[in-house]
Image (cartoon, grey):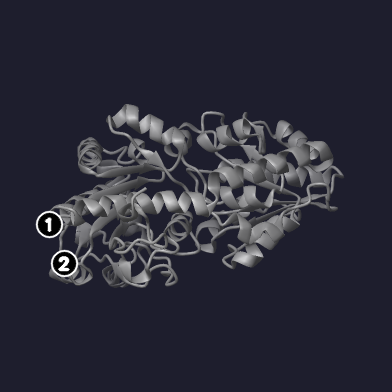
Amino acid sequence: MKSQDLPPGRNSNNPARVLLLTPESFNRVTGGGITLSNLFAGWPIDKIATIHSDCVPEAKDVCNHYYNLTENEIHRWGVLRYLLPKTRSKHMKLYSRKLNGRRWVISAIKFIKTMIFGDGIPEQVHLTPELCAWIDGFHPTVLYTTLGSNAMMEMAERLRVQFGLPLVVHIMDDWVSVIYRGGLLSHWQRKKKDRLFQHLVDVSTARIAICEEMAEAYLRRYGKPFTSFQNTIDVNTWRDFIKDPCVVGSPIRVAYIGSIFPYAQLDSLIDCCNSIQQMNEEGFPISLEIYSPQHLAEQYREQLVVGMAISLSDTISDDRIFFETLQAVDILILPVNFDRYTVEFIRYSMPTKIPAYLTVGTPILAYGPSGVAQISYAHKGGWGMTVEVRDCEMLKQAFRQLATDIPLRERLSSCARSSAAQRHDANIVRYGFQSVLENSSNLTKDS
């Protein structure tokens, strides 16, 4: 590899100035925020600037130069901007006070919106003078984006053209397959989405998928090659937290750590809660600890905490405590819903937690349909015991086996740690990812 191809931290003399456009900013709470933080770690902090629409507090350790999009840049189309503004805006607070407690009006407007537009209202995009001045002051040499809605895609295209930037797209879920459904006019949004996405794929200098399965599927679907990068981890840093799979506590401690979404893992996580509570009541001492961002999980407390064997706590944001917890428990679970929508949406997704799970080596139970990449990865990689049909009795049997079969636990743990070292180590993954950005930037520098 030539010296000009080396990423920052690898003797690169003139690192790329990366402008990010993402729905999620760098953070240590959400999957997307953590993935970005780990992939960009080590890049010169003054060479990164982020445009985002995230409500989660921004992390400052990897990037400290942010522009938070407002309704001046992206807002709902036409009169809808005023009829039902975004809930995080000051206009919505004023609007709610004017209603004087008549919440039924908001519910009625939302119902009408869904009937007409389905799951997404058309939005308008503006490159405001403030945003353009902020970008001009940064002098980017490459635009990296995870895309998202039609508005985010349109924003990416306008930034690419106006500032003459090479474009790198990174797709972390197959949202392209499922958004803009329902409603009388949603077909118009879908057509626009398909047109914009195909165009951005065509004009991008590099295309990244979250896993190999997605890269292969997108090559067939969009006719352009994709490479794949997902979350990464410094394996050596956390070697002291490797789990001894032969040690099993009493009661058996099972844990789920991560976000909870109705279109991803909620239903299967509820199955796990019910199964573990039943096992406990039947005399098998076992408990489930759930750690999830409070703003996502608290609304599901009654469905999840079905008895004394289940606990629900806020997410673990401290890295050391996170790894101590992974090491302390006896079984980690990786649940995926079995419904059609979920399968279509996260068929090619790869959870942020997987590299950490594998590095520690605590035995993993993957519960979900075989057609989903993360379940397939657990099965083929040999690092997870899989239950691939929705059956609580089979689930209970799997928990019992994982808790008592020591040779099985040792085999799963060994495969997990081997996979972490070979496929997720930061020294390999981060280097490759950052090389893609540097090589794309060089197209501008050399022109």
- Which image quadrant is residue 237 in? bottom right
The kind of secondary structure element at disc 1 is: helix
Position of residue 134 in the picture relative to residue 247 (left or right): left
Circle nearer the N terminus (1, 2) = 2
Residue depicted at x 83% and y 40%: 406
Along the line of sight, the residue nearer the viewer: 392 or 103? 392
Position of residue 122 in the picture relative to residue 57 (left or right): left
Q: Residues within 10 Å of mark 1 (few under 14, many from 20)?
A: few
Position of residue 87 in the picture relative to residue 251 (left or right): left
- Which image quadrant is residue 96 in? bottom left
Q: Residues within 10 Å of mark 2 (few under 14, many from 20)?
A: some
Residue depicted at x 36% and y 43%: 208
Instruction: Count numbered badges in the picture.
Output: 2
Along the line of sight, the residue nearer the viewer: 320 or 68? 320
Name the amino acid type tagged 1.
Gln
Are the residues flagged by discs 1 and 2 in contact, CB closer than 8 Å?
yes
The residue that mark 1 highlights is 162
Position of residue 198 in the picture relative to residue 30 (left or right): left
Residue pushed farthest top? 220
Using the image, tell me which numbered label, if any, was put on residue 132. Answer: 2
Residue 123 can be seen, yes or no: no
Where does the image place residue 171, in percent across and percent down from the top left? Answer: 37, 44
Residue 42 can be seen, yes or no: yes
Where does the image place residue 417, in percent across and percent down from the top left? Answer: 66, 46
Residue depicted at x 80% and y 39%: 400
Using the image, tell me which numbered label, if any, was put on residue 398. Answer: none
- Which image quadrant is residue 419 in? top right
Name the amino acid type tagged 2.
Cys
Along the line of sight, the residue nearer the viewer: 270 or 227? 227
What whole-number distance in Å separates the C-alpha atoms at marks 1 and 2? 9 Å
The kind of secondary structure element at disc 2 is: helix
